[in-house]
Amino acid sequence: SILIPRALTTLLQRSFSACDAVLRQAGMKANDVDVVLLAGGSTLLGVVQEGIAAYFGQRGAMGMDPTAVVAIGASIAPM
């Protein structure tokens, strides 16, 4: 459906606004980030990968399964 890419684009823009704020506080720019680790199943979608590449100037790291990254994070998170 065409609504999914539109909805994801809106969410990406909101996410990148948050990234802008954090990077600004750190005195950095998006292209200063060495590695973008993808986490979560939606990062497998082309529209998300393209948005990340456009924002950070690099493709997201695909060395690990993005779904496994979420599971690993959940397993070490304090309860």
Image: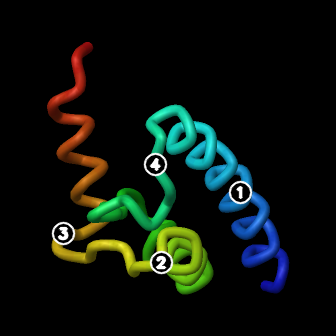
Quadrant housing residue 55: bottom right
Give me the C-alpha separation between circle 2 and circle 3: 20 Å
Give me the C-alpha separation between circle 1 and circle 3: 23 Å
Q: Which mark is residue 57?
A: 2
54 relative position to 77: left or right: right
Amino acid type at mark 4 = Met
**Label pair 4/3, CB-CB below 8 angstroms:** no
Give me the C-alpha separation between circle 4 and circle 3: 26 Å
According to the picture, the residue beneath numbered tag 3 turns out to be 64
Give me the C-alpha separation between circle 4 and circle 2: 14 Å
Q: Earlier in the sequence, mark 2 or mark 1?
A: 1
Q: Nearer the viewer, mark 2 or mark 1?
A: 2
Q: Residues within 10 Å of mark 3 (few under 14, many from 20)?
A: few
Q: Which mark is residue 65?
A: none
Q: Earlier in the sequence, mark 1 or mark 4?
A: 1
Which residue shows up at 44% across the image and 77% down it? 44
Which residue shows up at 61% across the image and 81% down it? 47
**Label pair 1/4, CB-CB below 8 angstroms:** no
According to the picture, the residue beneath numbered tag 1 turns out to be 11
Q: Nearer the viewer, mark 4 or mark 2?
A: 4
Q: Earlier in the sequence, mark 4 or mark 3?
A: 4
**Label pair 4/2, CB-CB below 8 angstroms:** no
Q: Residues within 10 Å of mark 2 (few under 14, many from 20)?
A: some
Secondary structure beneath disc 2? loop
Q: Nearer the viewer, residue 63 or 72?
A: 63
Secondary structure beneath disc 4? loop
